[in-house]
Image (cartoon, grey):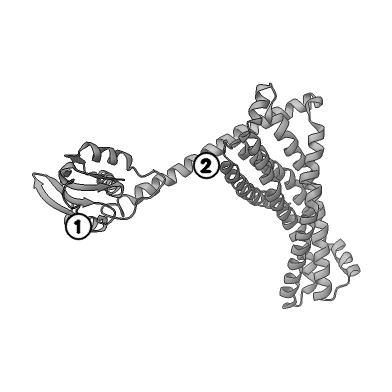
Amino acid sequence: MTTQCAKGAGSPLPTQAVLSFRPEGRDVRVSFSGALTAHSLSGADRVLRERFGRPAGSVIFDLQELVLLDTSGALFLNLEMEALRARGLPSRLENVNAQQGRLLSQAVLPEAHMPPEGFGVSVGRFVPRRLAHFGRAVLEAGGQFVGLTAFWGRFLIALLSVFRSPARMRWTSLIFQMEQVGLRAVPIVALLTFLIGLVVAYMGAQQLAMFGADIFAVNLLEVTVLREMGVLITAIVVAGRSSSAFAAQIGAMVANQEVDALRSMGLDPVLLLVVPRVLALMITLPMLVFIADIMALLGGAVAIRYSIGLSFAAFLSQLGEVARLNNFLVGMIKTPFFALAIGLIGCFQGFRATGSAESVGFLTTVSVVQSIFAVILLNALFALFFSYIQM
């Protein structure tokens, strides 16, 4: 959009901006003439940076002689005034006609975008805006944490109502979700953990062979798989599958106003949609971890067989001697907590969806990232806890 002053309507349109500076006591008046458009911004910006300095008083932008102004020029003026205010320098516009005023009021940069580097913007504006973005991110993260905590409370209330009255539980939905998140995840979990066990055992045997202790690759495999890798890899795979599915399914229902329809009928969406999904995860994840442990040990046995020549019978004998029940229990104790975090985060992000498909896709991605982060964080906390109690 371009606006032209009436006094220049009958003459050829200028193409350059001419700036003049006049001190007025402690203030500085910057008069614009000619054209302040996208083609002349670089020249105007260079003149301001070279000649403006740091006035002690206010800055007055005088547009009386300005013939041509477009959206880029109006945005440029708004940014310069905003940058001056950020430096503690008052600024104002004078001799602005009606057309220029409308254009200046419309050419406002959205808060989420960083203005281009120019006069007075590079340092004085960059730091406050970055701090503002950081502050908004912290507030948003805090708000999500509070919302997730409240959602956890709603889930507990719904779960308690199921314990008091089992007839309120949707058993068909629970069985269906167990099939979706448990049974259908067995192939990918088994394949990944088999390969991971194979790699861990092979690399461990290769490194231990340098010290003549390659037989201890079985010990390394047992501790790594049963205590950490089996449960962690399984939880990450389930987070990628189930958390995203929960967020997408519930988000689509929110977008289609199906959740509002449930509420209008007096039904509790948490009881109907969240409880079956989270319980299904808490029931099936320990089973998936058990399968993952078996497959990882099998993969490790194959790697050890072909790297150091230890037979499967000898591998089983050595594993029986070094295996500790504590390592298996540590891995299994963590699984319900991982399942709870994955399920709650996926469902919570689904309920945050709006009416657009874009929000559903975005929140699905957020649910996966947050679920994986929660799993790794919980795993680290459990590692510290079990190390403290020497289990």
Left or right placement of residue 272 versus residue 71 in this view: right
Question: Residue 17's image quarter?
Answer: bottom left
Q: Amino acid at mark 2?
A: Ala
Question: Residue 349's image quarter?
Answer: top right
Picture residue at 23% right of the left edge, 58% below the top: 43
Label drawn at residue 47: 1
Q: Amino acid at mark 1?
A: Val
Q: Position of residue 192 (x, y in %)?
A: 75, 60
Q: Which residue is mark 2?
A: 141
Q: Residues within 10 Å of mark 2 (few under 14, many from 20)?
A: few
Question: Residue 232's image quarter?
Answer: bottom right
Q: Is residue 55 visible?
A: no
Could you tell me which secondary element the residue under label 2 belongs to?
A: helix
Q: Residues within 10 Å of mark 1 (few under 14, many from 20)?
A: some
Front-lying residue, 320 or 299: 299
Q: Position of residue 168 (x, y in %)?
A: 78, 26
Q: Is residue 347 visible?
A: yes
